[in-house]
Amino acid sequence: MSKVPARAYQKLFPVPVMLIKVPNAASLNEKLVAEIEQVSITTPNGKPDSWACDVYTTLTNNNRLHERPGFHDFDLLMREGFMQFGQAMGYDFTVESLEITQCWVNIYNFGMSQEIHHHPNNIMTGVYYLKAPVNCSEILFHSHFADVLIRPAVYEENELNNPVASLHPEPGDLIFFDSALRHSVPTNDIKGERISLSFNARF
Ligand SMILES: [Fe+2]
């Protein structure tokens, strides 16, 4: 019997998601959580009317958190991350031309989630996890190929056919990706609070 020749699959157009494990995140997170408590007391839920999901967010009504004095260290960390991600992407920009357009908080209690979305009018997006209890919701990334008109039934999901990838966050995880990459948070089905900061940049 003739042997089938070996074959290789080239994976074109990679979708980069950069993950940084922030060292000594516990002390940073303690300070930021205290800041967020103040923010959440004074800021009503700014969830857009068009969202069907339930989540506490300051996306629309308090989205320049990085300008608060208590966010100074985080602001530096976020900018450094954007510089690293942008440089890896080969983007031609400088620290001076980097503009942080928004930075807001998302709090997920039991049963809360966030539907599929992307961050228009931006180039790069980041998320930082202040609280991510064991077994809390992951963040899901959705391939643009998820919208093809016909997706055949599969006998197994593998890296060539799976239109969704997940990342299980831990406190202190800082991730960066293209603002056009669609993502979502499935229902948080644990009792603990999951708190993340989201932020956008362009230049
Ligand atoms: Fe988002």
Image (tube, rainbow, N blue to C red):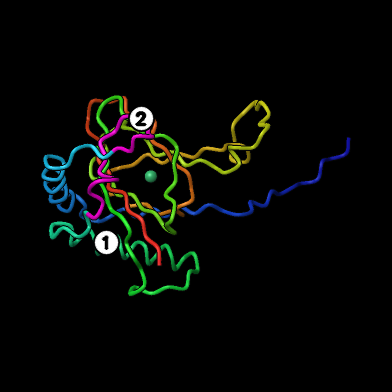
Mark with earlier residue (2, 1): 2
Label 1: state its secondary structure.
helix
Q: Quadrant of residue 72?
A: bottom left
Question: Which label sits on residue 53?
Answer: 2
Amino acid type of the residue that numbered disc 1 sits on in the rendered structure: Leu
Q: Residue at x 24, y 61 (%)?
A: 75
Percent position of residue 181, x then y: 48, 48
Q: Residue 173 magenta-drawn?
A: no
Q: Residue furthest right?
A: 1
Q: Nearer the viewer, mark 2 or mark 1?
A: 2
Q: Residue at x 24, y 30 (%)?
A: 109
**Relative to 95, does residue 151 appear above or below in the rendering?**
above
- Ligand 1 is found in the corner quadrant, namely top left
Front-lying residue, 106 or 31: 106
Residue 140 located left or right of residue 64: right
Q: Residue at x 43, y 56 (%)?
A: 121
Amino acid type of the residue that numbered disc 2 sits on in the rendered structure: Cys
Label 2–label 1 contact, CB within 8 A: no
Q: Which residues are magenta?
A: 47-64
Distance between mark 2 and mark 1 Cα atoms: 30 Å
Q: Residue 57 magenta-drawn?
A: yes
**Relative to 24, does residue 152 appear above or below in the rendering?**
above
Q: Residue at x 42, y 57 (%)?
A: 122
Percent position of residue 22, x then y: 27, 55
Label 2: state its secondary structure.
loop
Mark 1 — residue?
A: 77
Question: Which label sits on residue 194?
Answer: none
Quadrant location of the C terminus in the rendered image? bottom left
Percent position of residue 183, x then y: 44, 41
